[in-house]
Amino acid sequence: MSRSCSYDPQRAELMTEHLSSERRPASHSKTTRTIFRKFEFINVTNPFRYKDAEVRKLVRAHVVKDAFATKKQLQQHNIDQSRIQSRCREHPRYNTSIKESEIPIISQASVVNSHVPGIRLIANSLPQSLDPHPILSPVIYHITSMGRAMWPLELLCKFNPVSPAMWFNWAMSDNALFQALLYTTSSYASLLSGMTESKESIIHLGESVRMLQTRIKGEDRAGFQRQAKEIRDGAMAVVSCLALTEALRGGSTTWRIHMSGVKQMVDIEGGISSLSHTLQMKIYRADQTGAIHFLTSPFFSEPNSLPLSCTHLAPRIQPQTSKVSNLLHTLPITNPLKSQLIVLSDFSQTLSEIIRCRKITSLPSQIAFLQATYTLRYDFLSLNSTPAELSDTSHTLEYVLKIGALLYMQATLQEFPMAAVGSKNLVQTLMTSVMRVQIMDAQQGNLLVWLLFIGGIEAKGADREWFVSQLGKLLQRLRMDRWDEAKEALEGLWWIAKVHEEKCNMLWEEIEAVNNVIQKG
């Protein structure tokens, strides 16, 4: 192990295209709200009367009247705004470590309607006279809105484990983390608009890296350890935030650089188990998001850094779990994978109960749910099969089931649906390997149907067309002519109706449409 903390955040910063380390946020001048006034309708029936003195006098009177009224309203608005801000600054409740000059102005692109169905990102709708903190409120609304866009399942689960708002209190006492959070949210806002970066995201990245450099640049292992615990934890939180953002933007190289830095700092701390649960969860998310999106080995997959193992959880024996267990015992796969897939079934039923329950899930239950999620993902990310092993039927089936399980968790949890890469690599890997799986009986046929449906609902463009074509052929072979029959096959495996049924039904309709075209042709 290296004796120095050699992670250089500036090196990762330079990997980002168009980024200049000298750029600094411009000073943000106050903007005034444009007040529109409706003009009265002037009825001139004769088109040639617009030169008449009477008509011109009437028009001028309306214009002058509106101009004076608008000017007076703007003056009163500015006076009210100044009074409100002066009262807020004097109140001790709102004295934070973030200075007004350091709070960026969130661009309008961050608060417009997103491209995610069912999600509307709204700006602060409170009147200024009722706004408890007019300086920070736009930032808070921006962060919470992006959190909902990052995890649409919040509407069903009534909590959000990926929302940046969970880190807002910490960020208020750590300027580098504050800038890193805004880098994440502004980058995701750009992804919602079809871009991978924006002017705001570049500025926030540069500021965050600059602040982070002052903490760890030139520090050796002993020097890093001598720093305060809060500073060390803050540095790890900042870098994990940068790593997660690079994974969402599709920057595999910069994600690896940042995660390598996190790994060095965690090793200096004595292992990830020495960190707080919240910081562990943040690091795991950044690690797994990049590993899944780029289909590569994670940095924290060794046993001493894993959360509570799912194999120690006793799955509840319910009808769905029993069906899955009976099927798995007929397959030529290893016992550890069988146990993981049985726990995945129990995980599905747990999430289904969370969605069905009207009460908000308690914090300990949320943490246990996240631990099970991370452990399952790390288990399925152990994709060690080589091309030579894939020629063997058992290795091929194990590999395909792990890919299918990861895709199922992606389709179920729906984290970061607008990420640049997302499930693309998993989908394409499934396409190249799933057709090597041999069907021996009806149960295994249902398993193949499930794999193709899960891949199909996560696929886009030409990849989705491929799954539609293959499903059409397979369903004809299995003589599944109705949606109810296909749905019954899916419900017998890993399935949550409120999450999967609508998407799978849409895929079924595409299959029927293609079959109708083929029959008519």
Image: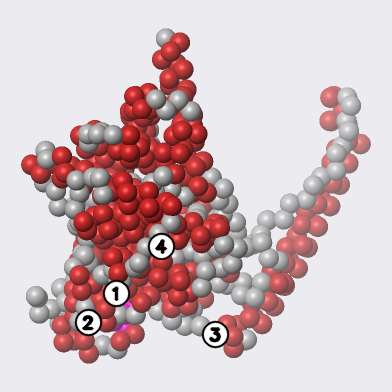
* Badge 4 vs badge 1, beta-carbon distance below 8 Å: no
Find out whether residue 7 is within the magenta segment. Answer: no
Task: Name the amino acid, label 1.
Answer: Met
User: Mark 3 or mark 1, which has the lower sequence index?
Assistant: 3
Q: CA distance from mark 4 to mark 2?
A: 37 Å
* Front label number (3 vs 1): 1
Residue at the image position 22 percent from the left and 82 percent from the top: 269
- Using a 10 Å C-alpha cutoff, classify the residue at mark 1 as few (fewer than 14 neighbours), some (14 to 19) or many (20 or more): many
* Badge 3 vs badge 4, beta-carbon distance below 8 Å: no
User: Mark 4 or mark 2, which has the lower sequence index?
Assistant: 2
Find numbered disc 1 in the image and state the secondary structure of the residue it sits on: helix
- Using a 10 Å C-alpha cutoff, classify the residue at mark 2 as few (fewer than 14 neighbours), some (14 to 19) or many (20 or more): some
> Which residue, given by chain and number where applicable, does mark 1 sit on?
236
Q: CA distance from mark 3 to mark 4?
A: 50 Å
Q: Residue 308 falls in which quadrant of the image? A: bottom left
> Which residue, given by chain and number where applicable, does mark 3 sit on?
95
Task: Name the amino acid, label 4.
Answer: Arg
Which span is picked out in magenta? 231-239
> Which residue, given by chain and number where applicable, does mark 4 sit on?
316
User: Mark 2 or mark 1, which has the lower sequence index?
Assistant: 1
Q: Give x and y (percent) for residue 345.
A: 38, 55
Label annotation for residue 269: 2
Q: Nearer the viewer, residue 409 or 341?
A: 341
Q: Give x and y (percent) for residue 272.
A: 25, 76
